[in-house]
Amino acid sequence: MSDRSSAQIIPFPTRAPTAEDATRRLQTALAALDTAVRQQRAAVADWQSAIGDLRTTMRTLGTSLHLYRARIGTLGANVESLADTARRLQTATDPR
């Protein structure tokens, strides 16, 4: 059996960061942030465009629904008129 208390952990060698390393890391972070901001702007522009397309589609749908309602009303009136004519004809031809 091994004695765990005798184990020694050897740290991975590192070097102290320099000002140049910090500057490079900052530049990398700023470049990543700049990319993220550009992508976010593009996403917002796409979203605004999609909202505009949706607004146009909804207006078109509203217009189509109003036209459909008007045509249904006209059709209903025509059907009622034909039904009245059919009832008159049936009454006129009924031998009772």
Image (cartoon, helix red, strand yellow):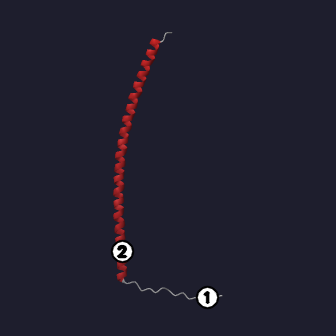
Is 82 above or below relative to 12?
A: above
Q: Residue at x 43, y 15 (%)?
A: 89
Q: Residue at x 42, y 27 (%)?
A: 76
Near mark 2 (Cα within 10 A), the count class, few <14, some 14-19 or many ≥20, is few
Labels 2 and 1: the sequence-earlier one: 1
- Give the image location of residue 59, x and y in percent: 35, 43
- What type is the residue that disc 2 sits on? Thr
Q: Residue furthest top?
A: 96
Which image quarter: residue 6? bottom right
Q: Which residue is mark 1?
A: 5
Which quadrant would the N terminus be assigned to in this image? bottom right
Q: Circle 2 sits in a helix, a strand or a loop, which is it?
A: helix
Q: Which residue is mark 2?
A: 28
| Residue contact between numbered discs 2 and 1, judged by CB atoms under 8 Å | no
Q: Residue at x 39, y 37 (%)?
A: 65
Asked whether 80 or 33 is in front, the reply is 80
Report whether 5 appears left or right of 76. Answer: right
Q: Residue at x 34, y 75 (%)?
A: 27
Asked whether 40 or 92 is in front, the reply is 92
